[in-house]
Image (spheres, rainbow, N blue to C red):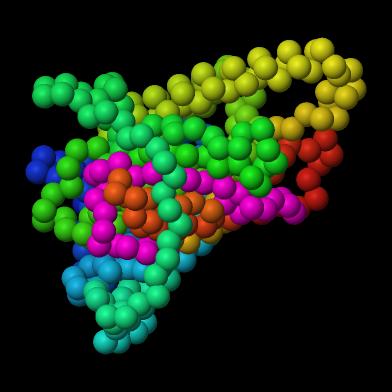
Amino acid sequence: MAKRMSTLLEPPALDSSKAAIENVLELTPVVDVGPDVFTNTRTLWHPPGARGIYGGTAIAQSLSAAMLTVPSDFAVHSMHCYFVLAGDSEIPILYHVERVRDGRSFITRTVQARQRGRPIFTTTLSFSKANSGGKKKLEHAAPMPPISLPEEPGPGEKSKFEQGGGGPFESQRAGIVNRNLNPEDKRARRLIRVRGKISEAGGHQAHLSALAYMTDSYFVGTVALVHDIPRFTSPAELNKVLNALKNPSDLDDDDISRVLKELKEEEAAELKRRLEGALSKATDEQKKTDHKEVGMMVSLDHSIYFHNPWAFRADEWILTEMESPWAGEGRGLVVQKLWSKDGILIATCTQEVEQGVVRLKQDEPPRSKI
């Protein structure tokens, strides 16, 4: 059986003058289908163990498509997204942009991502004109937590995050705050940035799309993290997931392998600690009752509020802090704040994750299906 085309047209050679993320998110107009319709230029990435393509790709490419229909002196200030169906990495996506409203200060767009004529993702975006807030403003912002940025490599050296990795962005854990308190009090921190330098031609639009791409990277696991539930029940299971890459991208494979290796080390240590504690104070029946294991994790929606869209570079370190103020009824809410390296609060994101969906494996058969 012939393999399906993952892009409508043969992808061009990678542009070495651009950062890897710019090539990943590149779009091609599809004028034969209609005005304001775009498609992915390059192969889509399916993360290991996921039901479909990486959600950050749909978020970022939808934003890129909308920005292609908006004047350059307007910047996105909010986008509200819904994941409708799992995207297939072996089928091209068509991004249909609708010009809902064009005002002097605000512009509204909707984007629907479709495969086989069916919507798999939809978003509504609002753009505001630069410096349209007036001279007198009410201002406040959550301060950036004190944190040390990683040391930059010397001339001719690679950072430890780049060694052996080829993904479009790099990251470093920055710790968990309030680790021993209640789940709603914990804060998970991480530093992220685009690999390489975003081109001048890409402009602030490329930085915004790159930021949108990165916001979905560690979101979904936060609810399980604050409850101390490993996403993989054993190192063997994690290895199985790692080896199950579907249609891996040349840009993502090594980097995701490194990230999953980090998870393997963290969760192996956590499993050992939990087992030792259980053996010392619990009966076999108690352990069965108390056991929690993630059965399914799916993002339902994703919102981004861009507070300072002109005041950051996605290829410089950005601090993210994630927390979960609520979980229940098979869902959970995660809030993420992002600061530039200069301490400017650049964005706030929210995601509902059924738990972003988190379902625990049940002893009884489930009563409903998504």
Q: Residue 358: x, y in percent?
A: 65, 45
Looking at the rendering, in which quadrant would you find the N terminus?
top left
Quick check: 152 above or below 36?
A: above
* Relative depth, front residue between 349 and 177: 177
Q: Which residues are magenta?
A: 305-334
Q: Where on the picture, by quarter, is residue 160?
A: top left
Q: Is residue 330 left or right of residue 323?
A: right
Residue 276 in view, yes or no: yes
Membership of 315 in magenta stretch:
yes
Membership of 145 in magenta stretch:
no
Q: Quick one: which residue is furthest to the bottom in this view?
A: 104
Q: Residue 146: x, y in percent?
A: 41, 41
Q: Where on the picture, by quarter, is residue 61?
A: bottom left
Q: Residue 154: x, y in percent?
A: 15, 24
Q: Residue 30: x, y in percent?
A: 23, 65
Quick check: 363 above or below 155?
A: below
Q: Is residue 116 left or right of residue 223?
A: left
x 17%, y 42%: residue: 197
* Relative depth, front residue between 37 and 268: 268
Looking at the rendering, in which quadrant would you find the C terminus?
bottom right
x 51%, y 26%: residue: 263
